[in-house]
Image: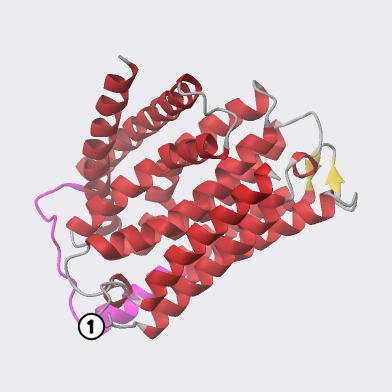
Amino acid sequence: MLWIQVIICIALVIAVSSKLSQSADMVAEKSGLGRNWVGAILLAGSTSLPELATGVSAVNYLDAPDLAAGGIFGSCLFNLMILAILDIITGGGPLFQQAQVSHGLAAGLGSLMLGVAGIGIFLAKRDLDPVLAWVSVPSIVLIVVYLVSARLIAKFERRRRSEVLEQESEAYEYEHVKPRQAYLLFAACSIAIVVLGVWLAWLGDEVVETTGLQESFIGSLLLAITTSLPEVAAGIAAVRLDAVDLAISNVFGSNIFNMAILGIYDIVYIKGDLFEKMSQVHIFSAVIAMMMTSLAIVGLIYRATRPSRLYLTYDVLGLIVLYLGGMYIVYLGEVS
């Protein structure tokens, strides 16, 4: 019965994510905000909310702040791996060749926030972490940077779109859809994906407990993947809609939102400084995520072609190597 529920839930997540990506594309057109901002802020927020719900539960009810933090950093790493998955399934040229260089803004902001989180853990482990009441200052910085990031991306996207429209007229794909319909459809799909995401995370927890993996690294990895499934499904759906920019901005935006979630965890964890409870291995995870982000930015700028004997570009191959190598080292750190 459990596995039947898992299959049904995954099928529903894929179906709803397809509609969510389409409605997000509609909102981008009707609002004039563009795919970059809608993908990085609205779509990323919708697909990442299940992590917020499950993480708050882990922090408050299970008293497992390190587990919640591990889920966040694991999700950031897997989100960047999604770029490689999207590159493999895309029908045209390499993924980064089809995307705008402007994604580097969201990627850079996400890398900045990963650095802040890593520094927060480093300082907390040496009793140097500044704290206001029970909340760590790095947590406050993460939330502030997220809010600033949303504004920066919006301003940059408006400026970029105005420059483009001066040179060429914009093509409209959803003229038959009214703005109100687009907004309501996006809201309904967002609510549905949050409910399904929380259900899927709960099912994943049941699976690893039933199979006896709850204390293992593999069990934690499976849980991280289940909470990231909405991002995978939404990204694939966006690529199939020929909305590559929406898919890529969702990945970078999810990492920005994940770092803000880490700050929220600290606020709701009233028993002390959240960063002090985190394992130092998360510093390594943050560094690997920053390296993967930097490599993605290089790919966006350089726009490499696929070698004749290799289906993947070297930047995407680098993402895969960094992810697998990083996870293996994290595994060694956990079991040692």
Please tell me which residue lies in front, 333 or 290. 333
> Does the image show residue 176?
yes
Please tell me which residue lies in front, 324 or 196. 324
Q: Which x, y percent locates residue 90? A: 22, 64
Magenta residues span: 156-180
What secondary structure is marked by label 1? loop
Please tell me which residue lies in front, 113 or 285. 285
Count of numbered tags: 1
Q: Which x, y percent locates residue 331? A: 60, 48
> Does the image show residue 40?
no
Question: Quick one: label 1, few (<14), some, or many (20+) residues within 10 Å?
Answer: few
Q: Is residue 224 left or right of residue 85?
A: right
Residue furthest left in the image: 176
Q: What residue is shown at x 58% (from left), y 62% (from top)?
A: 288
Q: Is residue 85 magenta?
A: no
Residue type, label 1: Ser
Image quadrant holding the C terminus, namely top right
Reading the image, the residue beneath label 1 is: 308
Q: Quadrant of residue 82?
A: bottom left
Image quadrant holding the N terminus, namely top left
Residue furthest top in the image: 1
Q: Which x, y percent locates residue 203? A: 41, 24
